[in-house]
Amino acid sequence: MRDTDRDWREVARKEPYWGVISVDRFKGRSLKDGDLKPFFQSGEAYLEQVLALVRRLLDPKFEIRRALDFGCGVGRLTIPIARASKSDVVGVDVAPEMLRLCEEHARAAGVRNLTLALSDDELVKVTGVFNFVNSYIVLQHVPPERGLAILSRLLSKIETNGVASIQLTYAKARKLLKHEEGRAEYYRREGDSIEELATRPDGRPEGSITMYDYDLNKVMAIIQEATKFPMVVRPTDDDGHIGVHVILKCGR
């Protein structure tokens, strides 16, 4: 299994903002004010949209009291979440450089209720429960063998009637097939699908951004354990990487 945590430490060292939003204007170790402002405004717009959906469709009185942002990066979403929270917010990331930049931006924004910690699959540095857990355009970069277990742990951190906002990818557009060539030496047809039997060593250089597709049956089985309430499911499409953004209220 590819060490994607090591990749992200390298991305954080070279292209921390582009690693969050892969648009050319966000390339480089630092951004000019003209690019930094829209970068963080996109995070504010995201949170406004999520809270509007929650209050319209799940819980009209919902307010963020204590929040966790998994894969906080440089703070694009974490800082707006902290501004909206009634109490403390925890941001975790696998890359120390991302955490350093997140702290720097939070300080510049006057945010004082944010705690940052280095992340791991077991979330050992995340204590207590939260009424809002967020992970957006993060799990898609984690191998599903790890990501499904992380998803389960994230949902277990949410108190009854708390809300989760989770995004992941489950398919690729045909135009991306060329990027998958040479990934396996042998295949087996299983009904209408192809199963890889022997995967070649991954020769991509360290710091490559990898996109993984999740089995939605497995994802929904995990979510089923966390809620019996209706949920909001929004389609996402990042240049042919097809996914879902699930917003759910936890509890039975």
Image (spheres, rainbow, N blue to C red):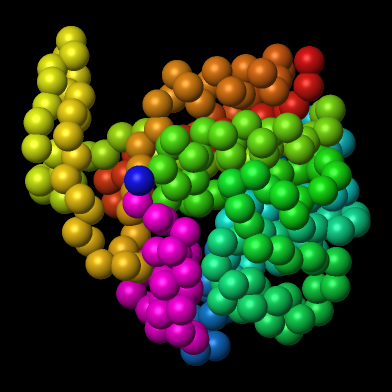
Residue 18 falls within the magenta-colored stretch: yes
Instruction: Determine which quarter of the picture holds residue 75.
Output: bottom right
Is 190 drawn above or below residue 84 in the view shown? above
Is 15 drawn above or below residue 226 in the view shown? below
Task: Judge from the rendering whether residue 67 lies leftward or rightward of residue 178; answer left or right.
Answer: right
Percent across and percent down for residue 97 are 56, 76
Percent across and percent down for residue 186 are 9, 31
Which residue sits at x=84%, y=28%?
160
Which residue sits at x=70%, y=76%?
103
Q: Is residue 17 visible?
A: no
Q: Is residue 232 visible?
A: yes
Which range is magenta? 2-31
Residue 38 falls within the magenta-colored stretch: no
Task: Judge from the rendering whether residue 206 lies leftward or rightward of residue 191; answer left or right.
Answer: right
Instruction: Determine which quarter of the picture holds residue 73.
Output: bottom right
Which residue sits at x=49%, y=51%?
137
Q: How many marks?
A: 0
Task: Judge from the rendering whether residue 168 lies leftward or rightward of residue 70; answer left or right.
Answer: left
- In front here: 146 or 35? 146
Percent across and percent down for residue 45 are 61, 58
Which residue sits at x=41%, y=71%?
11
Percent across and percent down for residue 138 are 50, 51
Is 19 drawn above or below residue 183 in the view shown? below
Is 149 drawn above or below residue 105 in the view shown? above
- In front here: 16 or 48? 16
Outermost residue, right direction? 87
